[in-house]
Image (tube, coloured by chain):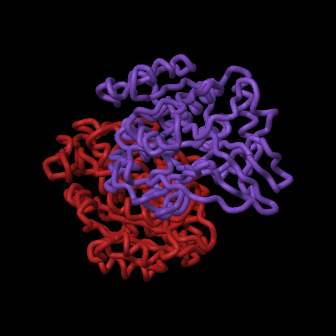
Chain colours: A purple, B red
Amino acid sequence: MTTHRRWTLARRPQGLPQADDFRLEEYDLPEIRDGSVLVRVDFISVDPGMRSRLSADSYAPALSLGATVESAGIGTVLASRNPKFEEGAKVWGGFGWQSHFVSEGRGMQVLDPAIYCGPVHETCAIGVLGIPGLTAYFGLSDLGKPKEGETVLVSSAAGTVGATAGQMAKIEHCTAIGIAGSDAKCAYLREIGFDHAINYKTAGDLIAALKQAAPKGIDIYFDNVGGETLDAAILNMRKNGRIVVSGQIAEYNTTNPRGIRQTLPFITQRLKMEGLVVYDYSAKFNEARAQLAHWIRHGKLSFREEIVDGLENAPNAFRGLFTGEAFGRRLVRVASA
Amino acid sequence: MTTHRRWTLARRPQGLPQADDFRLEEYDLPEIRDGSVLVRVDFISVDPGMRSRLSADSYAPALSLGATVESAGIGTVLASRNPKFEEGAKVWGGFGWQSHFVSEGRGMQVLDPAIYCGPVHETCAIGVLGIPGLTAYFGLSDLGKPKEGETVLVSSAAGTVGATAGQMAKIEHCTAIGIAGSDAKCAYLREIGFDHAINYKTAGDLIAALKQAAPKGIDIYFDNVGGETLDAAILNMRKNGRIVVSGQIAEYNTTNPRGIRQTLPFITQRLKMEGLVVYDYSAKFNEARAQLAHWIRHGKLSFREEIVDGLENAPNAFRGLFTGEAFGRRLVRVASA
């Protein structure tokens, strides 16, 4: 008999999430009725954006205490009484931190073998072709609006959102500068085409380091971080610069956010700062996914995955997103297919 | 023999400007050659935006030590050897804190009697039809983009920029909420059509006061202030809200700006914050001025002027912009016409 396990929210985290904030539960599955499928979860994601929703309402309502932690996932249909999903089909959707579920298939899609083949792994569905890649895509193209010859700065650049945004900047013939938290991450950024990579832990004065990397100033700052990094970027923005607020990871684990000190440059440099929630673009997801897959196939976009084994390790994998330990798209392998 | 007097920058102010930061000098005027005119300055403006330029480069380079303080002005042509300006003509332009000057007329314009008549006073040229009114006009229409039924919040609302922005919001069939620093100013805001006026000095919790005035949230925040007020507004913005950064008067007199704490709502509410320097719109100034004058003539836009007598009082009049003492467009009468 298979054991069904899931992680639920045991209490609202204070600061950095702790193991005790989550509870690993066993549960029974309902019967599969007409129209339903039984899915075995193979991979789940851990997402920095979920941190806000563990504590309070955010881009979506707060997760309820006792609810299964939400996430993206990839799985295999073990049994089906729904003609849209064959037994054995690979599917993806918002599966949550759990090993199995029974569903009527809403929000679940079969992985299209025409897209997920060759260099485009199946796990890309919840990585570079999933929410992180789409966030980079719409944030940079719709809000950043890069023009040839401009300078694009990206923070948390070795993550999937940042690495995708930086490589898109290169595709658009811009100069790409990445900020990351280790020499290994900076080496990776140069390897995938960034013109400059700054290790903020060893760079000393970040304002000066940015000035050196972008002597003419920054046109677009694709911000995954917020806080001091955002201030340093603002002080280096050129006239009519655009700041894309994609994430604010420095502010997620605190009830006392730092924010920014520098608002005067919004006037003097005519800056624009704009946030996005990628779900607002869902009508265009397929189009964007096709473009991203095209770039992967043509060697213009690479991605890095980090697989953590075992559902029991999901909370630790999640916590590592906020300590600088994660490097690339972090997925948890729940079952070996 | 007329005495020519001007205020120059004696030292760079630290914090709130002091009398000793400026020096009142007498000076000789050059000969009037072919193409030149001699102008007697009748009114000058004191402008909060000048504060930044006394200390450092801003939207324009910093004022040099020893240079005449720049400002808008209205004057009378006393002598002319330039066919574009008749003796006795009323002119306006960037005249500076001085009593007289000789000029070839660049940047100087004759006051158009078709515009400046009836309820449109000549002093409007450097007030509601000058940089303050134009800042409100382009900030609200081009960046705020108000739509019927939306809620528009304005800070420093009893000043010319704020009062014009709020009245424009009413013209666009929006709800207008003003923040000001005295009951008299709040009474004035209600008198000119604001739906709600909040005295931030007595309101207590501004976040709660805004919540009460705008229970459905704020669509546009026209910000003249920055700092804590901006944070309180951000926490009350609706989805897709726009923040127009027109001024940041709370940040002008400090080398240690407060900035804002709240950047997460940029993501969760998809906010956009954008700054403007009105001179970028100079090609459209005449068109905007005609529209503003039209609204004044038709009773849809009113303005308030505060005349301080005597060039010797210019520094004090300027200082009063930052203490909450100023109420309406503050001009200094240099000569009685």
Q: Is residue A46 above or below residue B188?
A: above
Q: Is residue A35 above or below residue A295?
A: below
Identify the residue at the far right of this view.
Answer: A83
Task: Mark yes or no: residue B24 visible.
Answer: yes
* Residue B35 in picture, x, y percent from top left: 46, 38
Closest to the observer, B39 or A7: A7
| Residue A242 falls left or right of residue B328 | right
- Asked whether B109 or A62 is in front, the reply is A62
The residue positioned farthest toward the left in the image shown: B20
A98 relative position to A18: left or right:
right
Image position, residue A62 (x, y; %): 49, 62
Q: x, y percentage for residue A73?
A: 63, 45
Residue A45 x/y as whole percent: 56, 42
Closer to the camera in the image, B329 or B236: B236
Q: Is residue B292 shown above or below A99?
A: below
Name the residue at 22% across, 49% down.
B5
Q: Quadrant of residue B161?
A: bottom left
Residue drawn at x 43%, y 82% as measured from the top left: B191
Name above or below for residue A304 compared with residue B273. Answer: above
Quadrant occupied by the C terminus of chain A: top right
Q: How many marks?
A: 0
Q: What residue is at 42 percent from the left and 38 percent from the top?
A: A320
Q: Is residue B260 left or right of residue A281?
A: left
Q: Residue at x 81, y 60 (%)?
A: A35
Camera sees residue B110: no
